[in-house]
Image (spheres, rainbow, N blue to C red):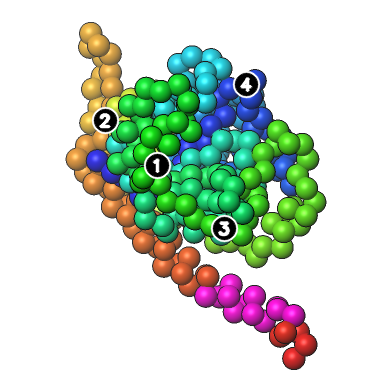
Amino acid sequence: MKISSFGGLIAAANDKLAFPLTKVGGTTAVRRIVANFRQAGIFPIVILSGAEEDEVRYQLSSSGVIFLHPEQKNQEMFESVKTGFAFLHDCCEKIVFTPVNTPMFSSLTLHTLMKVNGDVVSPSYKDKSGHPMVVSSGAISDILSYQGDCGLRGAVSSISSRRVWVNVDDDGILYTINEGDVPERLLAKHNRELPDLSVELKLTKGKNIFDSRAKLLLFLIWKNKSVSSACKQMALSCSKAWEILNVLEDSLQVKLFERKHGGVKGGHTVLSENGIAFLRKYRQLEEQIYRYSKDKFDVMKSVLQSQCSPSSAQE
C-alpha cells in the first residue's frame, strides 16, 4: 500500500567513504540534502546511517527523518542502498536517491526531475550524469534482483531502456565533497537562488496534536508494527512517543491503534484501519496543499525575477 508519492533515500552508511557532516556552504552535507528534500514535499526521508552515526542522529533527531542502519558495517554502497529501496518499496510511488557526498544539486533540478515520467530519471549536465536520481516503484524490484558485480551503476544499466535523461543547467549535480571545498562560483550560484517554498501541515487543539514528527511516528508504527522499533528509527524516546500517540487519539476521539500487551511473544502496537486511513488521507491532503502552494509560489517567484532582471532595472 502506497502512503506517499515520493520518498527520499540518502546513502551515508559507509564510514570510510561517506562524509555526512562535512560543511558545505555553512551547513553540513546531510542537512543540506534533507532540507532540499523537505522543501520538495518528500516523505518519508530515509538516511542510510553508519558514517558518524551518533552525531548525525543527534543533529537530525528533530528533523523528521528515518535512520536505517544496514545489517553489515561498511557495506558496498549498493548493498546498503538495497536495504533502503526494500524499506521504501511498498510505501512510495517513487524514490529520490542521492549519496550524501553529492549535496549541491539545486531545488530547481530536484523539482524538474520529480515532474518527469520514467522508471529511472537521471540528471545530465553537459553530457555528464549526476545526482539525485528518481526511481519508480516498478523499477525497484528489478534493481533489487540484480545479481551482477557492477553495483548500483550496473543495476541501473540493466534497465537502461527505461531510463530517462534530463538535461539541467546545474553543475551542482556533478560536485562531490570528495573533491574538496565547494567552488565559490557554485556556492554563489546557489546563494543567488530565491528562497524555495516549504510547507508543513499541522493539526492543533490549543497545541500541536499532529505534525511532521507525529506523522513519521504513525508511518513507522504502520511499517514496523512496533512503537519501540519506530522510536529507534527516528531517534525518539518511547515515553515521548506514547505521549504523542495518547494526545492524538484523545484529541481526535478516534481509535487509531490496536494495542496488545504482554503475552509469550511480547506486546505490540499496530495502526487500526482508522489509523491507516487517517495517515493516507492526511498525506494526500498534504501533497495537494503542497502542489497548489508550489504552483502559486512559482508564479510569484517568476514575477519577482522579472522585476529584478537587468532589463527591468534599466527601465
For marks 1 and 3 on the same chain, the one whose residue lies earlier in the sequence: 1
Q: At 70% across and 78% down in the image, what residue appears?
A: 308
Q: At 36% across and 39% down in the image, what residue appears?
A: 159
Label 2 vs label 3, nearer the camera: 3
For marks 1 and 4 on the same chain, the one whose residue lies earlier in the sequence: 4
Amino acid type for the residue under numbered disc 1: Ser
Report x, y in % for residue 69.
49, 22
| Residue under pointer 4 | 15
Amino acid type for the residue under numbered disc 4: Asp
- Alpha carbons under labels 2 and 3: distance apart: 43 Å
Camera-nearest residue between 56 and 126: 126
Quarter-wise, where is residue 274 in the image? top left
In this view, the residue farthest toward the top is: 264
For marks 2 and 3 on the same chain, the one whose residue lies earlier in the sequence: 3
What residue span does the magenta drawing correspond to?
Answer: 299-310
Whether residues under marks 1 and 2 lie with C-beta atoms below 8 angstroms apart, the answer is no
- Alpha carbons under labels 3 and 4: distance apart: 31 Å
Magenta stretch encompasses residue 17: no
> Secondary structure under badge 1?
helix
| Residue under pointer 2 | 270
Label 1 vs label 2, nearer the camera: 1
| Residue under pointer 1 | 160
Label 1 vs label 4, nearer the camera: 1
Amino acid type for the residue under numbered disc 3: Val
Camera-nearest residue between 209 and 114: 114
In the displayed structure image, the side of residue 5 where residue 71 appears, left or right: right
Q: Which mark is residue 171?
A: none
Report x, y in % for residue 82.
41, 27
Question: Residue 233: in sight, yes or no?
Answer: no
* Other residues around mark 4 within 10 Å, as few (<14) / some (14–19) / many (≥20): some
Report x, y in % for residue 1.
24, 41
